[in-house]
Image (cartoon, rainbow, N blue to C red):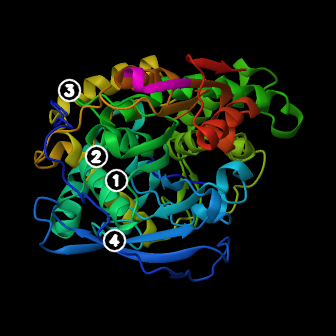
């Protein structure tokens, strides 16, 4: 069973103001072979790049970013760099060059050096941790799922503990994190790579990073692909992304339900989509009241929120439908519980710290417990599958106010952005992607893909969407108008 951790600008500074970040190619990267591991292509090279801890003090303390690349095999056709901006916050693209070089069409891979990186605080880039108690690293706690009947008492207590642990143990790197800072880091990386302009492919949270970079440094962008788009509302930022889970899961769950109904003889969850939905909701409520022991899991039980968290993650791809159906079957007592699969504690500590550092430093969050409680009760009635989680209380409500406003994504800059989004994405719904389209205005064209799952290009989309993005990266051509790939 795969578990995914979250994943996942009152007034933005005008891009015409003096920008942060490197202005010219003044650095040189010392590329060396990467440590060989599972899935690492022997052509992939690795290096480190120094960037300022504080971009307002560019000659002060420096931190390290881990970077990787696979250089084009056809230098004579090279256009530049295609930077792979990961999702998250907390995601890494350090091994994405190895993954994507096998999947990108030749007309794309021959034109670009594929470059991945660990954003600051992640993995090999000056990693951070809040040193939380291991018991507090349960994914269902970290996502903020409310308790039985929507009570947020436990959610609030966890949020307070997490905020305090990050304040005590996070350090200067965590305190300086934000999407604005990641965009400045990317511009320093651009200079270190010796590139006047960057092409990039941002996925999920990486779409907001990419849109912020295109707003702060518009003339340093070449061909930009934003895949599975976050709503860039600068007043809410990640608070809005979490809230979007409610509608996004409702968009996507019917596809799982239809899949499970077609396999009623295997899983016994119901022979219609409506019956499967009823089974899921009833089982989650039953497990709220009577959890099943599940030794080796965190928590060591299958409760309603563990089932809901599994459901949310399983909707990211059709390939994970069997894991959810199998867990539901076990929860109904029709089969043994599967062997629990745990993410290593160090990875959970790192991810939690990066998530909190980024989303809490981007924008101030509401602080009233009673306000959150009333919102949870209303939200769970409207979106029962997610049971109020999208509006539960976050550690950000107990966080110091951000030092800078969130960036307001705008339409000012070259028209060189292609957006792609599945119509039934469980994390970044099409309705939110349309807000990114509106913010970017004439800079962008939208390709909507009639598919389900999170991640469209070369992932859970379709051949039409893949062709459209590949053509744009290869020769710069885009559809003249927003389009739908059926």
Give the structural element (helix, strand or loop) at label 2: helix
Q: Earlier in the sequence, mark 3 or mark 4?
A: 4
Q: Residues within 10 Å of mark 3 (few under 14, many from 20)?
A: few
Q: Is residue 16 magenta?
A: no
Residue, disc 4:
127
Q: Are marks 1 and 3 in contact (CB under 8 Å)?
A: no
Give the structural element (helix, strand or loop) at label 4: loop
Magenta segment: 441-446
Q: Residues within 10 Å of mark 4 (few under 14, many from 20)?
A: many
Q: Residue 371's mark?
A: 3
Q: Earlier in the sequence, mark 1 or mark 3?
A: 1
Q: Earlier in the sequence, mark 3 or mark 2?
A: 2
Observer-nearest residue: 128 or 42?
42
Residue under the point 37% across and 45% down? 209
The N terminus sits in image quarter: bottom right
Observer-nearest residue: 241 or 322?
241
Q: Closer to the camera: disc 3 or disc 2? A: 2
Residue, disc 1:
355
Observer-nearest residue: 322 or 347?
347
Residue under the point 70% across and 27% down? 255
Alpha-carbon distance for marks 4 and 1?
12 Å
Alpha-carbon distance for marks 4 and 2?
17 Å
Left or right: 349 as drawn, with respect to 447: left
Q: Residue 479's mark?
A: none
Left or right: 132 as drawn, with respect to 456: left
Q: Quarter of the image holding residue 448?
A: top right
Q: Is residue 106 above or below residue 170?
A: above
Q: Residue 359's mark?
A: 2
Q: Closer to the camera: disc 3 or disc 4? A: 4
Q: Is residue 479 above or below residue 477?
A: above
Count of marks overlaid on the render: 4
Give the structural element (helix, strand or loop) at label 3: helix
């Amino acid at each position: 069973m795969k578990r995914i951790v979250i994943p996942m600008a009152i007034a933005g500074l005008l891009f015409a103001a003096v920008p942060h970040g490197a202005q010219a190619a003044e650095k040189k990267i010392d590329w060396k072979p990467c440590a060989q591991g599972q899935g690492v292509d022997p052509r992939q090279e690795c290096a480190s790049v120094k960037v300022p801890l504080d971009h307002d003090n560019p000659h002060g303390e420096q931190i390290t970013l881990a970077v990787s690349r696979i250089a084009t095999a056809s230098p004579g056709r090279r256009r530049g760099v295609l930077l792979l901006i990961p999702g998250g916050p907390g995601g890494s693209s350090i091994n994405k060059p190895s993954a994507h070089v096998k999947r990108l069409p030749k007309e794309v891979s021959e034109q670009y050096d594929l470059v991945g990186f660990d954003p600051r605080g992640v993995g090999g880039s000056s990693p951070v941790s809040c040193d939380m108690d291991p018991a507090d690293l349960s994914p269902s706690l970290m996502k903020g799922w409310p308790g039985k009947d929507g009570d947020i008492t436990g959610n609030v207590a966890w949020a307070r503990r997490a905020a305090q642990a990050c304040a005590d143990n996070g350090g200067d790197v965590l305190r300086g994190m934000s999407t604005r800072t990641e965009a400045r880091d990317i511009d320093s990386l651009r200079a270190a790579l010796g590139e006047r302009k960057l092409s990039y492919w941002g996925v999920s949270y990486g779409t907001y990073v990419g849109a912020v970079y295109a707003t702060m440094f518009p003339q340093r962008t070449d061909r930009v692909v934003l895949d599975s788009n976050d709503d860039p509302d600068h007043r809410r930022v990640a608070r809005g992304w979490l809230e979007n889970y409610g509608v996004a899961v409702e968009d996507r769950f019917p596809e799982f339900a239809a899949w499970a109904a077609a396999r009623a003889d295997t899983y016994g969850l119901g022979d219609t989509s409506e019956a499967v939905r009823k089974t899921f909701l009833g089982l989650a409520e039953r497990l709220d009241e009577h959890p099943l022991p599940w030794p080796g899991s965190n928590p060591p039980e299958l409760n309603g929120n563990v089932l809901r968290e599994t459901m949310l993650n399983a909707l990211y791809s059709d390939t994970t439908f069997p894991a959810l159906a199998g867990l539901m079957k076990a929860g109904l007592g029709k089969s043994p519980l599967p062997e629990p699969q745990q993410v290593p504690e160090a990875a959970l500590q790192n991810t939690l710290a990066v998530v909190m550092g980024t989303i809490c430093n981007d924008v101030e969050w509401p602080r009233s417990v009673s306000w959150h409680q009333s919102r949870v009760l209303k939200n769970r009635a409207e979106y029962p599958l997610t049971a109020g989680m999208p509006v539960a209380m976050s550690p950000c409500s107990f966080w110091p106010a951000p030092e800078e406003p969130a960036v307001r994504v705008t339409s000012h800059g070259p028209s060189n952005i292609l957006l792609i989004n599945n119509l039934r994405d469980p994390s970044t719904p099409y309705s939110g992607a349309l807000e990114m389209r509106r913010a970017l205005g004439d800079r962008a064209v939208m390709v909507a893909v009639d598919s389900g799952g999170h991640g469209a290009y070369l992932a859970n989309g379709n051949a039409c969407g893949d062709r459209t993005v590949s053509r744009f990266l290869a020769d710069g051509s885009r559809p003249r108008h927003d389009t739908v790939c059926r």
